[in-house]
Image (cartoon, helix red, strand yellow):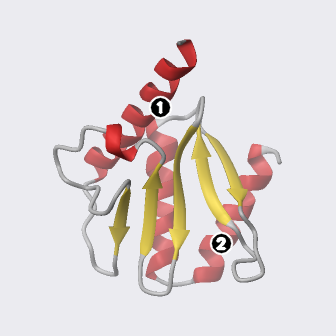
């Protein structure tokens, strides 16, 4: 799937959610694109229970996914345990769980994305 098509699919997911989860997912997407303009966007794992699928961002390997649930968002980092997280954003194994009204330190999130890309690139070089 082309990146452009995936971007449109993610935008459709955001619009369909139509609430704080959509707004937050759009924010997360913009922060990821800001952190890494060369990121690849995809939508994966379409199932009968989740026909829209799950947004996924990668660069030389998976960076993170943006999973939506009824009462929270889960931003899961593929290399979460290997990331330095001095601000404590990762509050669940490999993931940032966000509920309505939760704050997100945008600069710390951008740094996590940059770290994830760097780890992917280092692994690719080996």
Q: Is residue 47 above or below residue 124?
A: below
Q: Position of residue 124 (x, y in %)?
A: 57, 19
Crowding around mark 2 (Cα neighbors within 10 Å: few <14, some 14 to 19, many 20+) is many
Q: Position of residue 2 (x, y in %)?
A: 81, 45
Which residue occupies 44% across, 72% down?
73
Question: On the rendered structure, is 123 left or right of 17?
Answer: left
State the residue lying farthest toward the top. Answer: 126
Question: On the rendered structure, is 76 left or right of 97?
Answer: right
Which residue occupies 62% across, 59% down?
55
Q: CA distance from mark 2 to mark 1?
A: 24 Å
Which residue occupies 50% across, 35% down?
36
State the residue lying farthest toward the left. Answer: 86
Question: Number of callouts in the render?
Answer: 2
Q: Nearer the viewer, residue 69 or 35?
A: 69
Which residue occupies 76% across, 77% down?
51
Label 2 residue SS: helix
Q: Position of residue 126 (x, y in %)?
A: 53, 12
First along the sequence among labels 2 and 1: 2
Single out the mark in the foreground, 2 or 1.
Answer: 1
Crowding around mark 1 (Cα neighbors within 10 Å: few <14, some 14 to 19, many 20+) is many
Mark 2, residue position: 13
Q: Nearer the viewer, residue 101 or 48?
A: 48
Tell me if label 2 and label 1 are in contact, CB under 8 Å. Answer: no
Q: Is residue 39 above or below residue 80?
A: above
Residue 46, quarter of the rendered image: bottom right
Q: Is residue 30 above or below residue 12?
A: above
Label 1 residue SS: helix
Mark 1, residue position: 117
Q: Position of residue 119 (x, y in %)?
A: 43, 27
Numbered circle sitting on residue 88: none
């Amino acid at each position: 799937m082309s990146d452009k098509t995936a971007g449109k699919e993610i935008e459709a997911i955001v619009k369909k959610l139509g609430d704080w989860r959509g707004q937050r997912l759009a924010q997360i997407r913009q922060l990821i694109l800001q952190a890494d303009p060369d990121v690849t966007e995809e939508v994966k794992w379409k199932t009968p229970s989740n026909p829209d699928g799950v947004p996924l961002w990668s660069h030389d390997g998976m960076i993170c996914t943006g999973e939506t649930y009824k009462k929270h968002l889960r931003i899961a980092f593929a290399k979460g345990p290997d990331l330095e997280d001095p601000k404590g954003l990762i509050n669940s194994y490999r993931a940032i769980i966000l509920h309505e009204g939760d704050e997100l330190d945008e600069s710390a999130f951008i740094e996590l994305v940059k770290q994830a890309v760097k780890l992917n690139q280092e692994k690719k070089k080996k």
